[in-house]
Amino acid sequence: MSAPAGRRHVSVDGRRVCHRVDGDGPPVLLLHGIGRTLRDFTELHELLAERFRVHSVDLPGYGGSLPMTRPCTLPALADFAAHYLDAVGVDRPAHVVGNSLGGAVAMRLAASEPARVASLTLVNSAGFGREVTIALRLLALRPLGRLLLRPSRWAARRAELSLFHDPALATADRVAHALEVARQPHAARVMLETARDLGTFRGVSPQWREELLAEVERLDAPTLVVWGDRDLILPAAHLDAARSRLPRARTHLFTDCGHMPQIECAEEFHRLLVDFWAATGGDTPTGGGTPPRDAADAGDRPAVAETG
């Protein structure tokens, strides 16, 4: 799969990773959900790049990034996020924003290496309840899970429609990209590894959720939790659980919005996020001035074609 314009590649733990980096200012890391890619943050990425140094990355085995040499589990994904920050030269705490699975990865990163995280923003995040769409619960059933992941345009369109309250956002371009991603030779394996690490047919497993939330509760990092009130993947009732477990966190519920507020409510979400960072003192570079560009930008290398 060829990397679209604006994307480039970097080596993380010896594996090629697709990412996008733009802007100058405090560092921001954007983490997508299961089966998704960095394209889910295109709108937010471009808005934030006016004031921040924004990193969007395809998690290992998704989009244009090659799989890890180890199974795709939540701890492994958090380790990857830390190693990615090292690879691109981010040597100061970053604002970490995670959608769905990306939210759980962000929490695991913050709990394991709190010095790396300036703030947490959890967007319709996994980790706050057992309930999850039946489409993901079925992946736990062998061999049904692999059969369900057979690529088809119908399945790709159905999946895109499930993400948004406004069906017009399930565009032909988004469906085509989802189908291209699903056709990657490692895509089904990586998605099954991820889904089965996080849950069973009964839903999201309580053990990792309870352990992780107990660690996140003890963190000092400013935290924002947002949800769309029409989410069909992880229900908006999970926002109440987040308020209960993380009482110091700021929360916001977007109306007439599905699983991806960063797309469906991009402008509103951008304003909310920048205001949150400003209020917590995280929107200006430490020591003033413009920070140096990170190592990934040396020479502004062009993206190279994916080969597998």
Image (cartoon, helix red, strand yellow):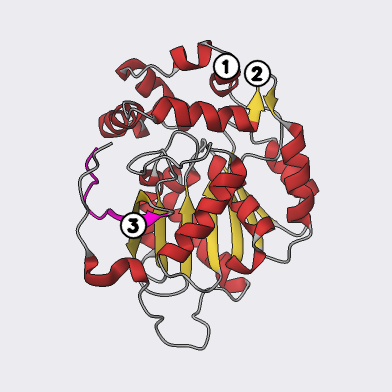
Residue that numbered label 3 is attached to: 10
Q: Quick one: label 3 or label 1, which is nearer the N terminus?
A: 3
Give, as a three-letter code, the residue at label 3. Val
Q: Residues within 10 Å of mark 2 (few under 14, many from 20)?
A: some
Instruction: State the CA–CA distance, disc 1 to disc 2.
Output: 6 Å
Q: In this view of the protein, which residue sits in the foreground, 215 or 162?
A: 215
Q: Quick one: label 1 or label 2, which is nearer the N terminus?
A: 1
Residue 50 position in % (x across, y down): 36, 69
From the viewer's perspective, tell me whether residue 308 is left or right of residue 187.
left
Q: Which mark is residue 174?
A: none
Residue that numbered label 2 is attached to: 201
Residue 58 position in % (x across, y down): 40, 46
Instruction: State the CA–CA distance, disc 3 to disc 1.
Output: 34 Å
Disc 1 + disc 2, Cβ < 8 Å: yes
Which of the two discs, 3 and 2, sits closer to the camera? Answer: 3
Q: What segment is highlighted magenta in the picture?
A: 1-12
Q: Secondary structure at mark 3?
A: strand
Residue 71 position in % (x across, y down): 53, 36
Residue that numbered label 1 is attached to: 138
